[in-house]
Image: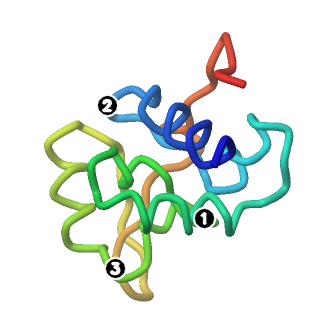
């Protein structure tokens, strides 16, 4: 349970308009368990800013692309058009958050 709590603490600390990858969140916690980060977010009930955690290449969370885009637009997260589904991706190099003090 401590890992899940730590994941949610990191996710909650990501500022609006910024993102981390699942692997980034795991690495901040000294882990390589990117899939466990996704599982934690899925089981959290949506009460945390899940859209600020993206897949490889800046792709939004699978199955939540439309809802995530609404959040990205509201927060001013930079996105780019891509030719494959879902038709957009977060500009990861621009939007990636680099915490000065990791939550771990």
Crowding at dot 1, Cα within 10 Å, few <14 / some 14-19 / many 20+, comes out as few
Q: Residues within 10 Å of mark 3 (few under 14, many from 20)?
A: few
* CB under 8 Å between discs 2 and 1: no
What residue is rendered at 39% in x and 87% in y? Answer: 85
> Nearest the camera: 28 or 19?
28
Q: Find residue 3 and report its horizontal and vertical position in percent.
A: 68, 45
Query: Which label is found at residue 87?
Result: 3
The answer to whether marks 3 and 1 mark residues whose Cβ atoms lie closer than 8 Å is: no
Judged by depth in the image, the label closer to the viewer, 3 or 2, is 2
Residue holding disc 1? 57
Residue 80 x, y percent position in the rendering: 38, 60
Q: Give the CA separation, mark 2 to mark 1.
A: 19 Å
In the image, taking residue 78 as reference, residue 104 lies left or right, namely: right
Position of 56 relative to 3 (above/below): below
Indicate the secondary structure of the residue bearing disc 2: loop
Q: Is residue 17 above or below residue 33?
A: above
Q: In the image, residue 99 lies at what x, y percent?
A: 62, 20
Give how far apart the Cα atoms at labels 3 and 1 are: 13 Å
| C-alpha distance separating marks 3 and 2 | 22 Å
What residue is at 33 percent from the left and 45 percent from the top? 48
Indicate which label's residue lies in the foreground, 2 or 1: 2
Residue 75's x, y, as percent? 22, 37
SS at mark 1?
helix
Q: Earlier in the sequence, mark 2 or mark 1?
A: 2
Reading the image, the residue beneath label 2 is: 16
- Mark linked to residue 22: none
Residue furthest to the top: 100
């Amino acid at each position: 349970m401590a890992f899940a709590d730590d994941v949610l603490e990191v996710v909650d600390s990501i500022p609006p308009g910024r993102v981390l990858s699942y692997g980034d969140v795991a690495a901040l916690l000294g882990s390589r368990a990117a899939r466990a980060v996704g599982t934690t977010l899925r089981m959290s009930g949506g009460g945390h800013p899940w859209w600020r955690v993206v897949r490889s290449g800046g792709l939004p969370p699978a199955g939540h692309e439309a809802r995530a885009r609404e959040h990205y637009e509201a927060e001013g997260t930079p996105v780019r058009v891509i030719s494959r589904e879902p038709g957009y991706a977060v500009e990861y190099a621009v939007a990636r958050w680099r915490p000065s003090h990791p939550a771990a």
